[in-house]
Amino acid sequence: MPVEYYLDDALTAQVTSVTEDKNHHEFKAIIEHDIQIGSFFKLHTDKDGEPKAGTGPTVVVQKVSATNRVFSSADYLLIVDAHAYNGSTPHQQKAMIHHGLMKISVEEKNGHVKKGVRKPDIVEFNATITRYGTYSEDLLGLKEVFDEVATSVSTIPKAKK
């Protein structure tokens, strides 16, 4: 399964738009510390060269190593599955970008900026869901399971003391 990577000005503009959205402050540290984010699409193709759905996450974030700084001035790379992105609504596209950006960790301690990539956690998940709602089929399914569990829990009689 061949894979191609390519830059796209519209994707870059979308990443900037989500990062600099004045209505939300999740990415304040990224802006304050002038963290540079490079973005590009990853396109999976079949044996005939036709685009096909990728496997794994739709957005991956990688911290650029000191060695790879030769090739990029970015601090982080946002790698977006082209098939998933192009098959989504503009709202879903922004949500995907937001979810990926939430994995970036920027902390200042004693005047030193520490950059890293967060492991997936509930804070990242909650921030994206709060801002964009259940924007994908997977999240709609998860919401249905949570709703079912919440209903079941609320109907269990409380134990007497």
Image: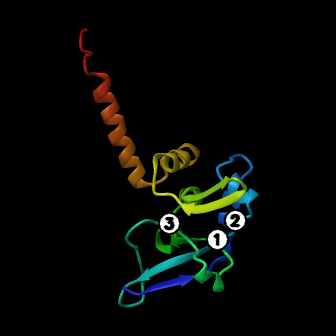
Mark 2, other Cα within 10 Å: few <14 / some 14–19 / many ≥20:
some
Marks 2 and 1 close (CB-CB < 8 Å): yes
Q: CA distance from mark 2 to mark 3?
A: 18 Å
Between residues 124 and 9, which one lies in front from this camera angle?
A: 124
Which image quadrant: the C terminus? top left
x 63%, y 60%: residue:
114
Q: CA distance from mark 3 to mark 1?
A: 16 Å
**In the image, residue 151 lies at what x, y percent?**
32, 28
The secondary element bearing badge 1 is classed as loop
Q: Which residue is mark 2?
A: 35
In this view, the residue farthest toward the front is 110
Quarter of the figure with residue 12: bottom right
Q: Which residue is mark 3?
A: 59
Quarter of the figure with residue 157: top left
Which image quadrant: the N terminus? bottom left
Q: Which residue is mark 1?
A: 75
Report whether 3 appears left or right of 26: left
N-term mark: 2 or 3: 2
The secondary element bearing badge 2 is classed as loop
- In the rendered view, tell whether residue 15 sits above or below residue 68: above
N-term mark: 3 or 1: 3
**In the image, residue 136 lies at what x, y percent?**
45, 54
Q: CA distance from mark 2 to mark 1?
A: 6 Å
- In the rendered view, tell whether residue 120 sits above or below residue 78: above
Q: Nearer the viewer, mark 2 or mark 3?
A: 2
Q: Nearer the viewer, mark 3 or mark 1?
A: 1
- In the rendered view, tell whether residue 25 sits above or below residue 114: above
Q: Amino acid at mark 1?
A: Asp
x 38%, y 91%: residue:
48
**In the image, residue 147 lies at what x, y percent?**
36, 35
